[in-house]
Amino acid sequence: MFKLRSLGQLTLTAFLLTGLTACSGMDMPNLPTMSQLNTNSFDSSLGGRLAQAASIRSTGGTGYCYQYVAQAIHSQLPAFLSGQHAYMAADQLASSQYFREVSVSSNNLSSLPAGAVVVWSKGSSESGHISIADGQGHEISDHITTQMTAHYGGGSARVFLPANTL
C-alpha cells in the first residue's frame, strides 16, 4: 500500500501549466484552455479526500470500478452518479457543479492531481472504465494500479478535476 501525499497549490499549479493539452487529437472546444485556467477554481482539499475515500474502499477486485468510484465520490459529495456502466459517468460529471472537465493528453494522465476522475469511453468494451487519481501516478477504483494511459477497449479518456464551489 502507498501513502497519499497532500496535494499542495504548487503541485496543482505545475500540473495545470504543463499537463493540459489537446485530448488525444480530439477537438474539445468547450473545455478550458490553459490561458483560461485558474488554480483557485480547483479544490485540492476535496481531491485529497476523494483519493483517500477511494483508497479505503478499494478491494483489489475488478469489474466494479463504477460502483467503487461512485461510492467514494458520494462519501464526500451529495449523490448524483447513476447508471450501470462507467462511461455513463462522464456526462454526469461534466454537468456537475462539483467537477470541471479539462483536456489532458494521454501521456500526462499519470501526472494528474489527487482526486482527478478519469472516465474512459466504451471503445470495444461494454462499460468503459472510471478511476480516481491518487496524485502519485496511480488510479483507484475497485483496485489500485498504475494510471492507465490507454484503454484496453480503445476508448478515449475524459478528465474531471474537483471544482472549488465557493
Image (spheres, rainbow, N blue to C red):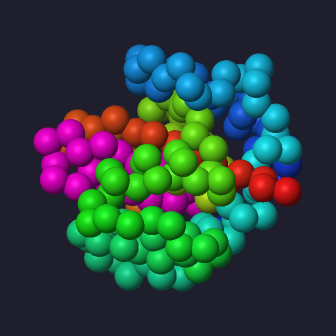
Residue positioned 41% across, 20% down in the render: 26
Residue positioned 34% across, 35% down in the render: 156
Q: Is residue 34 above or below residue 61?
A: above
Left or right side of 45 for 26: left
Q: Nearer the viewer, residue 24 or 70?
A: 70
Q: Quadrant of residue 70?
A: bottom left
Q: Position of residue 27 (x, y in %)?
A: 45, 17
Residue 119 visible in the picture: yes
Q: Is residue 87 above or below residue 69?
A: above
Magenta-drawn segment = 118-136
Residue positioned 54% across, 82% down in the render: 56
Q: Nearer the viewer, residue 7 or 93?
A: 93
Residue 1 visible in the picture: no
Q: Position of residue 114 (x, y in %)?
A: 65, 57
Residue positioned 59% across, 79% down in the render: 75
Q: Position of residue 98 (x, y in %)?
A: 65, 57
Q: Position of residue 62 (x, y in %)?
A: 26, 70
Q: Is residue 131 in the magenta section?
A: yes
Q: Quadrant of residue 121?
A: top left
The mark total stands at 0
Q: Is residue 58 above or below residue 145?
A: below
Left or right side of 149 for 152: left
The quarter of the image holding the C terminus is bottom right
